[in-house]
Image (cartoon, helix red, strand yellow):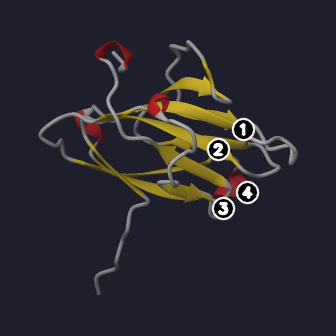
């Protein structure tokens, strides 16, 4: 019997995307992704100039009063040809991960052109979440980054 599998997020090798992850809960969450690294682009909608590659980042909890949920924007680099396949992203706190805060990302072979999706092009409200990981919403904007903005 063939089991049906549906990925939460599908990307292509060669893409670079900005993911904005909002924490809509009253608990801290440690977002972790397998196979790739990312750059921190903004913290709570404030741009940062950080050159440290990461695979895990803490996302602060919502205080229940603020108008905006705490968020991070991460520049995800899917250009490594050795990363094609299915891998996971999840909350790195064990009880959260065991409780189901885990999603799958399918990285397909390269398309005919590279697509770069920046969160910096957002105007007004965020688009609908591309994936939901428990109380974390992963928002991806579609557009194009200047070459100098892409991870080198």
Q: Nearer the viewer, residue 126 or 42?
A: 126
Instruction: Tell me the residue at 72%/38% (across/down).
Output: 70
Please give the label number shown on residue 22: 2
Give the crowd class for mark 3: few <14, some 14-19, many >=20 residues within 10 Å: few
Q: CA distance from mark 1 to mark 3?
A: 23 Å
Q: Are marks 1 and 3 in contact (CB under 8 Å)?
A: no
> Where's residue 52, x and y in %?
53, 16
Q: Is residue 6 left or right of residue 24?
A: left
Residue at the front extreme, as displayed:
124
Q: Sequence-wise, which precedes: disc 2 or disc 3?
A: 2
Tell me if label 2 and label 1 are in contact, CB under 8 Å.
Answer: yes
Q: CA distance from mark 1 to mark 4?
A: 21 Å
Residue hosting label 4: 95
- C-alpha separation, residue under disc 2 versus residue under disc 3: 20 Å
Mark 2 or mark 4, which is nearer to you? 2
Give the structural element (helix, strand or loop) at label 2: strand
- Quarter of the image containing the C terminus? top left
Q: Are marks 4 and 3 in contact (CB under 8 Å)?
A: yes
Q: Earlier in the sequence, mark 1 or mark 3?
A: 1
Specify the label residue 98 is tagged with: 3
Which image quadrant is residue 133 in?
Answer: bottom right
In-image side of 101 versus 115 (left or right)? right
């Amino acid at each position: 019997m063939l089991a049906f599998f549906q990925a939460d997020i599908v990307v292509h090798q060669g893409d670079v995307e900005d993911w904005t992850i909002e924490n809509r809960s009253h608990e801290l969450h440690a977002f972790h992704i397998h196979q790739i690294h990312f750059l921190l682009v903004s913290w709570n909608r404030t741009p940062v100039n950080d050159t440290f590659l990461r695979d895990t980042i803490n996302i602060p909890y919502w205080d229940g009063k603020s108008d905006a949920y705490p968020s991070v924007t991460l520049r995800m680099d899917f250009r490594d040809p050795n990363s094609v396949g299915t891998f996971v992203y999840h909350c790195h706190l064990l009880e959260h991960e065991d409780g189901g805060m885990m999603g799958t990302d399918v990285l397909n072979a390269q398309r005919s052109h590279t697509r770069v999706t920046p969160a910096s092009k957002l105007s007004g409200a965020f688009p609908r979440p591309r994936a939901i990981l428990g109380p974390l919403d992963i928002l991806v904007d579609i557009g194009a980054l200047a070459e100098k903005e892409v991870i080198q």
